[in-house]
């Protein structure tokens, strides 16, 4: 029964090993996609798939064949993954605070302002290389095409996504005379054009809408990260038991307090005897 942890670790790592194959396949399939949104996921998916593959293979070999060094590498990799996920979750909550939009009187939807988001997000979205990729992603999503035929009544009665609110229309406060914005209005009112490939894609409100969508997606991802951390901690605890069992099998001495010295016991046997003697002396 004391080697049950090895069996559990072995089966779990076999499942994650098999799960890494479709992840790698999805990354390779995304590489052939022509959409900008999908192509952004290629590198993270591919890296995630290979990390899961290597770590799962190491844990499976170590647990099933009692290879102590493989389990040691597996435990190190697991603790690094836990630390990385904790850092990623904490960093995500730190930089995605704020936002949420401002309620527009008489409308269901909200409008979003770039100043409501963290300086780190504002700096990233303002850089040309990041904004070009985000703008291409918004264009390929065809969010604005979904509301192109809306009437003014629809804008009063229906909700908008953050991207539709920020990129597909001018701010509600804008006033136009003969299709031209009058003076003394915010800059986004002048950046708006009624052409399908222009609209308000150059507006700060569009960048704010993209950041709002990023924050919402990040909060959902944080929930997944927390669940993954709990799972990895449980897996790490089982891995420690499996590592201990592998060392016992390798040094060839039985489990329990009444241990008998075998021919050529390894260093951990002598260390364990020393530690028990020190513990008995103190107690």
Image (tube, rainbow, N blue to C red):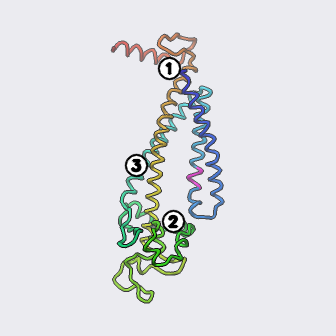
Q: Please tell me which residue is depicted at 49% across the width and 42% down the height of the picture.
A: 81
Q: Is residue 181 above or below residue 110?
A: below
Label 3 CA crowd tier, 10 Å (few <14, some 14–19, many 20+): few
Who comes first in sequence, dot 1 or dot 3? 3
Tell me the crowding category of disc 1: few under 14, some 14 to 19, or many 20 or more residues within 10 angstroms, Cα based: few
Label 1 or label 3, whichever lies nearer to me, is 3
Give the residue displayed 47% in from the left and 67% down from the top. 163
Q: CA distance from mark 1 to mark 2?
A: 55 Å
> Dot 1 corresponds to which residue?
268
Name which residue lies at 60% across and 33% down.
11
Q: Position of residue 215 (x, y in %)?
A: 43, 58
**Which secondary structure, mark 1?**
helix
Q: CA distance from mark 2 to mark 3?
A: 24 Å
Residue 264 locus on image (x, y percent): 57, 14
Q: Quadrant of residue 178?
A: bottom left
Q: Quadrant of residue 86?
A: top left
Position of 177 compared to 6: left or right? left
Please tell me whether the stretch drawn in magenta is mainly helix, strand or loop. helix
Mark seen at residue 134: 2
Residue at the disc numbered 3:
90
- How far apart are the alpha carbons under marks 1 and 3? 38 Å
């Amino acid at each position: 029964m004391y080697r049950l942890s090895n069996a559990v670790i072995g089966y779990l790592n076999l499942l994650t090993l098999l799960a890494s194959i479709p992840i790698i396949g999805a990354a390779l399939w995304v590489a052939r996609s022509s959409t900008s949104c999908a192509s952004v996921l290629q590198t993270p998916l591919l890296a995630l798939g290979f990390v899961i593959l290597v770590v799962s293979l190491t844990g499976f070999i170590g647990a099933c064949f009692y290879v102590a060094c493989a389990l040691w590498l597996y435990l190190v990799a697991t603790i690094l993954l836990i630390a990385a996920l904790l850092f990623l979750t904490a960093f995500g909550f730190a930089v995605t605070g704020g936002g949420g939009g401002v309620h527009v009187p008489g409308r269901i939807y909200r409008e979003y302002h770039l100043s409501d988001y963290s300086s780190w997000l504002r700096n990233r979205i303002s850089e040309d290389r990041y904004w070009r990729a985000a703008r291409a992603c918004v264009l390929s999503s065809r969010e604005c095409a979904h509301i192109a035929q809306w009437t003014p009544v629809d804008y009063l009665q229906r909700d908008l996504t953050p991207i539709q609110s920020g990129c597909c229309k001018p701010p509600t406060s804008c006033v136009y005379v003969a299709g031209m914005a009058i003076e003394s209005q915010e800059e986004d009112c002048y950046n708006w054009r009624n052409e399908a490939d222009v609209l308000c894609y150059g507006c700060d409100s569009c960048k704010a809408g993209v950041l709002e969508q990023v924050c919402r997606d990040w909060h959902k991802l944080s929930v997944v990260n927390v669940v993954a951390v709990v799972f990895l901690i449980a897996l790490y605890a089982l891995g420690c038991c499996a590592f201990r069992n592998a060392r016992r099998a390798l040094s060839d001495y039985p489990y329990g307090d009444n241990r008998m010295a075998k021919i050529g016991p390894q260093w951990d046997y002598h260390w364990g005897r020393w530690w028990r003697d020190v513990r008995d002396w103190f107690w």
